[in-house]
Amino acid sequence: MADDVQPQNDETPDTEQLEKPSTEKAPGEEPKGGTTQPEPDHEAVGIGVVGGPQVDEDAGE
């Protein structure tokens, strides 16, 4: 079966490489949490243009 196939190329990592963490950032560069921006005082209910014509493209003629 195809699940048993191992890659046969030079890009196969060795055990030492697999034991290293897979991150590109230094350990002291954790993401910053939270924001200081207030929540919006409105709620989005759909996609469209406010004040535009109401067109039902599925209605057909």
Image (cartoon, rainbow, N blue to C red):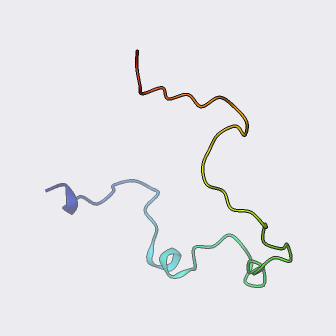
Image quadrant where one finds the N terminus: bottom left
The location of residue 17, given as percent across then percent down, is 52, 74
Image quadrant where one finds the C terminus: top left
- Between 10 and 1, the one lying in front of the other is 1
Quadrant housing residue 54? top right
Furthest residue to the right? 36
| Residue appearing at x 72%, y 84% in the figure | 27
Furthest residue to the left? 1
| Residue appearing at x 65%, y 39% in the figure | 48
- Between 20 and 43, the one lying in front of the other is 43
The location of residue 16, given as percent across then percent down, is 50, 79
| Residue appearing at x 65%, y 28% in the figure | 53
Residue 29 higher or lower than 24, as above or below? below
The location of residue 13, given as percent across then percent down, is 46, 67
| Residue appearing at x 66%, y 56% in the figure | 44
Furthest residue to the bottom? 28
Residue 43 higher or lower than 33, as above or below? above
- How many numbered dots are placed on residues in this image? 0
The location of residue 28, given as percent across then percent down, is 78, 84
- Between 23 and 9, the one lying in front of the other is 23
